[in-house]
Image (cartoon, helix red, strand yellow):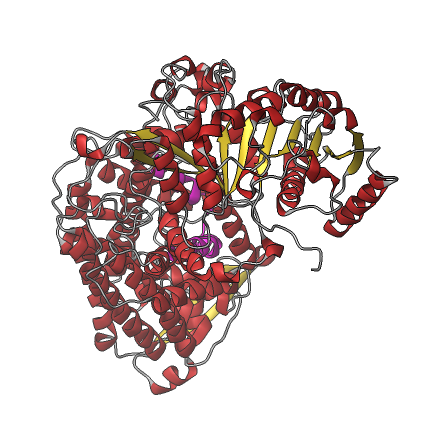
Amino acid sequence: MSNEHTPLLAHGVCGLSADNAVCGIGASEGTGEASTPNAVPRKLNTFFGVMVPTVLSMFSIVLFLRTGFVVGHAGLLQGLVMLLVAYTIISLTILSICAISTNGAVQGGGAYCILNTASSSAFRVLPQGYWYTVLYSSIVLLLVLMVCLVGAHIFARTSFLILLVVTISLLSIYISPLALTTPLKFLITHQGPGNQTLTYNASYTGFNGTTLKDNLGSGYTVDYSTGKVMSFATVFAVMFTSCTGIMAGANMSGELKNPSAAIPKGTIIAVLYTFIVYVLLFILASSTCERTLLAQDYGFFQRINIWPPFVTIGIYCSALSAAMCSLIGASRILHALALDQLFGFPLAPAAITSSSGNPWVAVLYTWGLAQCVVFAGQLNAIAGLVTVFYLLAYAAVDLACLALEWASAPNFRPTFQVFSWHTCLLGILSCLVMMFVINPVYSSASIVLLLLLLLFLHYRSPTSSWGYISQALIFHQVRKYLLMLDVRKDHVKFWRPQVLLMVANPRSSCQLINFVNQLKKGGLFVLGHVKLGDLDTLPSDPVQQQYNFWLSLVDKLGVKAFVDLTLSPSVRQGTQHLLRITGLGGMKPNTLVLGFYDSCTPEDYFLQDPAFCESKGSGGDDFGVDLPSLQAHFPPVRHVESPRWLTSEEYVGIISDAIKMSKNVCLGRYFFQLQGEGMGTKTDGATRIIDVWPLNLLQPSSTSAASVDVCSLFLLQMACVLNMASRWRHAKMRIFLCVEAESSDQGWMVKEETYRELLRKLRIRASIKIVPWDSVVQLYGQKQTQDPELEGLTKPAQALSEDFQSAVNRMLMEHSAEAAVRFLYLPRPPAHSSQSHTYLSQLEAVTYGLGPTLLIHGLTPVTCTEL
């Protein structure tokens, strides 16, 4: 309610939500339709939309071309351990995915992560070489692009046909050892270092106990495709790429009829199916083939198949399907990112869709990214990087579910209950541990990249319609710590200002708002406002509609403040309401700040600050309040003056009420003249001066005492707090002591020494200025014994003559003219309302023309010299 030099109040005006998934899996509760402009009916069921793409993504070419690689290097036992570790990690993540996807409606976009597209390898039946590999991969990728550009319905049909072919190929692999009972010998050659030819003799033994025994342990050797010695980590990285398709179904969420039911059911069944297939293949390979054959020939399944083309067809189909699943899934993710405008203009075209709703531009984006990956040439060369990114994505999903669980939001109630915060935390830790086991460099770089993306999004602050999980977490933690903030344990050592600043019209109060923001020292800062009215006569509460405007004002000013508004028949009653109810627990205002009550012509801050008038600031904020609306909501300050709706009695009554409620009171005057307090002002306060007059200038008898009262100490503390603020840190603080030189010999020296010792104990850096004011005191008139309730204000008004008031004002002008701000002692207001006008006229006369001045009446003990 501050208005500095105008009446107190204006008349008549004054992160992923918990019910949604994060990472784009969920968006809003209620409708199951996509919220995109070109939303189309969802057609895919659990089998075609989730199971088929998940199974195909998890099979990929690793199924056919890296099973022998894993068993040949790691052996059956370590291979099974790798499989268990990998599936444990993805199972923990699946629990999180299922929990998120069964909590409300699920929109398109799947998980916000970038999936790399698998590429096919060069096979013995085709010419070999790096560029041939790139060519084959590019051709497959181009075919995938054509399918994905048509749409999800073609993808579903194509995937089903591919799954049938892959299943037939798998059956041929399982049946072949039963048909081929005769041992086979193979001669395998590779191009070694220095163009030398390496030759290996390898055998297929059929089911054989000795072969199984020989393949139980590990036998890490040089990988012929990369020329590097393999280890548990490098083999696991390759093997784990076969487990990275668990989100293929979730990524199709925008195409599913009932994603909340289809994603958990389809994903779990697909993962169980693939796990069984891999275990059987590991046992089959280790029981029938010597280690040399497994390690030196990725395509050994072709050699031992009853009809080798079965495997070749399976390899091509699995590579095609994995690429297709990844491309269409990643394009949906990219489309969702573009719709949410998370990365602005670079991704904006990805929001474009065809008439059928297919995000074809996002498909092209993803194809371009995948084509870049193709140039790596070898799966083993990029397996570590790909695996690290997948693990980081899984850790992010687990973290999202953990955050939702820890936030304890009532709308987070997934129908899938087989999860807890323990599984989420274990999933995060296991993903992070395996990342660094695989490749510490890649892991560190990926985490840094993730943090950079988060920082970019944080500072860009894009608008979102799906809420912020951070807000739910903050709420949960703040509530917990507020309960721990026990007012019974407050101690004077840790006192800080907690301010309620009453604002009538911010157009004339912005400078005071900015000043108090510097004065709060990390304490509570609340902008309070009273709208005059009676709820009985209104159809609805008008206050609720105004919060967004005030909060946008706070954002515009860049102050760290809360807003509290109330509806009341009078300003005094409204201020009482706010003093009683503002804050929560141990965070409640202990200081009331008011603008000064006078008849000065107000300044319009909105017309002075470029932030409120530049065209570049006319855009709306995230909550629909644009600059013209903000300016229109707060009326021009000239409308505040007439009619005068706040009487002097009511204003002084507000001060009295606050003191009765044990609140400190500050009155701010002339703060429209304060320079350098606006947002973005670059000043270190090096030339500023803070003047403190800690004694009651309207009661000269109080200045003769050598000790200081609670109010004087409060003045010193507030001035010291301001001196610690960033923009006032280098300001000089001066303390003025008024002495009567003729009243006692060397009395002023005793007072100066007393204050100097006090400043030393309080660790306050300030200079002390002695001001003789005998000539001023002489004008005070006959000293009288004062009624305690009228302390600082004499019963007969003539006791504080106009000459005395003018003399005090001249003394202040003479010694504090160069100060940036002045702290003065505010006398206690009169108990009788009939003397309110006299009280205010005295304050106005004493501070007339001074410049920015804060009159303070402190009741709170704020410092202790014994501790």
Quick one: 118 or 52, which is closer to the camera? 52
Q: Using the rendered view, name the quadrant where residue 409 is placed.
A: bottom left
Q: Position of residue 490 (x, y in %)?
A: 54, 58
> Compared to 139, does 480 lie above or below?
below
Instruction: Please tell me which residue is depicted at 19% across the width and 33% down the height of the picture.
Output: 540
Q: Position of residue 864 (x, y in %)?
A: 67, 55
Quadrant housing the N terminus: top left
**Residue 331 in sight here:** yes
Farthest right residue in view: 745
Instruction: Please tell me which residue is depicted at 50% across the width and 52% down the height of the picture.
Output: 447
**Residue 313 in sight here:** no
Overall secondary structure of the magenta section: helix
Q: Using the rendered view, name the quadrant where residue 698 is placed.
A: top right
> Compared to 845, does 156 lie above or below?
below
Instruction: Please tell me which residue is depicted at 49% across the width and 62% down the height of the picture.
Output: 488
> Compared to 748, does 437 lie above or below?
below
> Compared to 270, does 478 lie above or below?
above
Quick one: 386 or 129, which is closer to the camera? 386
Q: Which stretch appears magenta?
A: 365-394
